[in-house]
Amino acid sequence: MSTAAMTETSRSAAGTERKSRTWVLPSVVLALLGTLWLYVGSLDLDSVEARSLAGDVVLGALWQHIQLVVVSTVLTVAVGVPLGVALTRPGIRRAGAIVLAAANASQAVPSIGVLVLLAMIFGVGFWMAVVALVLYALLPVLRNTMVGIRQVDPALIDAGRGMGMSTREVLLTIELPLAVPVMLAGIRVALILNVGVATLAAFTNAGGLGSVISSGIALDRMPVLIVGSALTMALALTVDWLAGLAERALRPRGI
Amino acid sequence: MSDRPTPSPDAMIVLDGVSKRYPGQDKAVVSDLSMEIRRGEFVVLVGPSGCGKTTTLRMINRLVEPTAGRILIDGRDVTHVDGDELRRGIGYVIQQIGLLPHLTIADNIALVPKMLGVAKSERRARALELLELVGLDPALHADRHPRQLSGGQQQRVGVARALASDPPVMLMDEPFGAVDPIAREKLQTEFLRLQERIRKTIVMVTHDMDEALRLGDRIAIFDSGSRLAQFDTPLEILSNPADDFVRDFVGSGAPVRRLSLLTVADVLGTAPSTAAGAGRAIEVDPGDSVHTALEQVLAAGAEGIEVAVPEEGSRFLDLGTLLTAASQPAKVLT
Ligand SMILES: Nc1ncnc2c1ncn2[C@@H]1O[C@H](COP(=O)(O)OP(=O)(O)OP(=O)(O)O)[C@@H](O)[C@H]1O
Ligand SMILES: [Mg+2]
């Protein structure tokens, strides 16, 4: 299975990582996938189940799911980080509070509602699902970028200005690097959120593991439902694990 | 400002009728302040909290923009030049030190040279040289992160960083405030020794009068509203306080504090010569402070001091004569 393969290579790549516990998540994922494999192998699949669980069907759904998550997360970061930075600049700082409040409120709207609403306005398909995912995952990225920058010790900014840095140089050499850990935490949350919410994309015809789950429900076939859910879980755990590794690798040293 | 006298040629920093009123406040924090700081001079600004010391200091590198008046550095009017560029040429040390935690010590020191476009290897060499200068072993500290250093070590790095581009002027805002008293005294002593070598023009803010007396060539005492109550040498401030505010601010113990500023040579002029030979005398140098001389006399249980004077040979002063001469406020030789 491709998740398992992915897990393996990433693990060996990260083999030099110090710190314990980096192996916990991948072993959980491997155990989950192994159990799933044994479970499906032990079943006597009827023709409907066999069709729904054919390798290319499941892997295709998984691949679509990954595409949805990756594209939407990249776009979320591309929108959220610059917006978050802009909203911490003096002058429009006050607008930041308003935007945050609005973003917080939007988080309360159920994701399925957003999806359906957008589908009604823009039609269905991959990109519509991406738009919905971006809207949904924007908040943690935006908020953590703003919080990350605001929590930088004012004395450091003062020291930077005092040695002749322009506001831009202060942003690039002081504020952003020091905000990285908090920003990465927000991006990680967005990623995990996207893995989950992307299952709903099936309702708007965008494919993904959600389509495996919903066909399991629609056809009343328990094994199909289980495979879809378990793969979603395994994907979420793998993504979280990779994000954790990235967080550790990208965090500036010394802080 | 045309009614003001033109600054003297050895003036390094000139504040000419400078005022600052922060937006939204109806009273100026600093109003119509004029000061002249000479090349290579170490000037300390002291005064009660909130009197505008930091504001005054930050107007010199224009982190705070004056609302009126002119600022000249080395004869150049910098009131309206590009602030970032100006600040790259002025060293600045703050109480919170402000080392960037994600950069190594060497990279922290090399920040300004980097902005000025100095090549990487050269920056590194400069950083190591400066670490040496402030008394830190480069091999041990250059590649560490600020968190791994003690407060006193960090403060030294802060000084090294301010010196990185060899600026003629250094501004320091309570630079030794964040370290414990013992480390502070050590830093002060080392800093004085460093200043003897590098001879920068330094303006330092403190609210510790003892620190001001120890370090300053001249001390500017501010009253609230940045009124310059007195701007003079430590000895002159202790001997002839300009008004009651200065007297109060300096506090009790001024006569005793003077003893460490007064040299034996200073008191020789006013002291009548006593006949030598009566008792045991301690030999002291004319450059020694009266405080040191007294300490030695008291420790040895002697009756006076013996000073070698170039033309007259040697002079003996007994304890009483020494003290009487040292307590005369008017006579100050400079
Ligand atoms: N950015 C600012 N905006 C408005 N008011 C300010 C600002 N900075 C300082 N002030 C006010 O100006 C006055 C002088 O402040 P300043 O920091 O210059 O005092 P200080 O002499 O350095 O005091 P301290 O010894 O406490 O450091 C204070 O009343 C302070 O509240
Ligand atoms: Mg201050």
Image (tube, coloured by chain):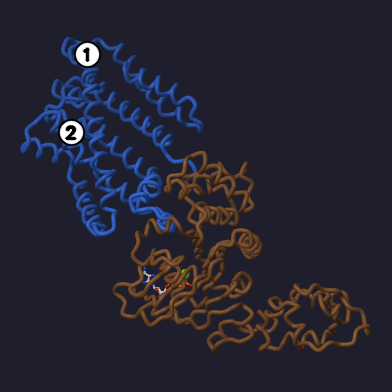
Q: Is mark 2 within 8 Å of ligand 1?
A: no
Q: Secondary structure at mark 1?
A: helix
Name which residue lies at 19% across and 52% down.
Answer: A102
Give how far across and how far down residue B95 sits, in percent.
51, 62
Colour of chain B as rendered? brown
**Amino acid type of the residue that numbered disc 2 sits on in the rendered structure:** Val
Name which residue lies at 42% across and 54% down.
Answer: A160
Give how far across and how far down residue A236 sits, in percent.
31, 30
Whole-number angstrom distance, CA of label 2 to CA of label 1: 23 Å
Give the left or right position of residue A96, taking residue B67 as reference.
Answer: left
* Numbered circle sitting on residue A56: 1
Q: Nearer the viewer, residue A201 or A242?
A: A242
Q: Which residue is mark 2?
A: A130
Task: Name the chain letter of the residue that bears numbered label 2.
Answer: A
The chain whose colour is blue is A
Q: Nearer the viewer, residue A86 or B133?
A: B133
Q: Secondary structure at mark 2?
A: helix
Task: Name the chain letter of the residue that bears numbered label 1.
Answer: A
Vertical side of A135 occupied by B157: above or below: below
Of callouts 2 and 1, the N-terminal one: 1
User: Are there few (<14), some (14-19), or many (20+) residues within 10 Å of tag 1?
Assistant: few
Vertical side of A73 occupied by A99: above or below: below
Give the left or right position of residue B192, taking residue A193 as reference.
Answer: right
Give how far across and how far down residue B261 sits, in percent.
68, 76
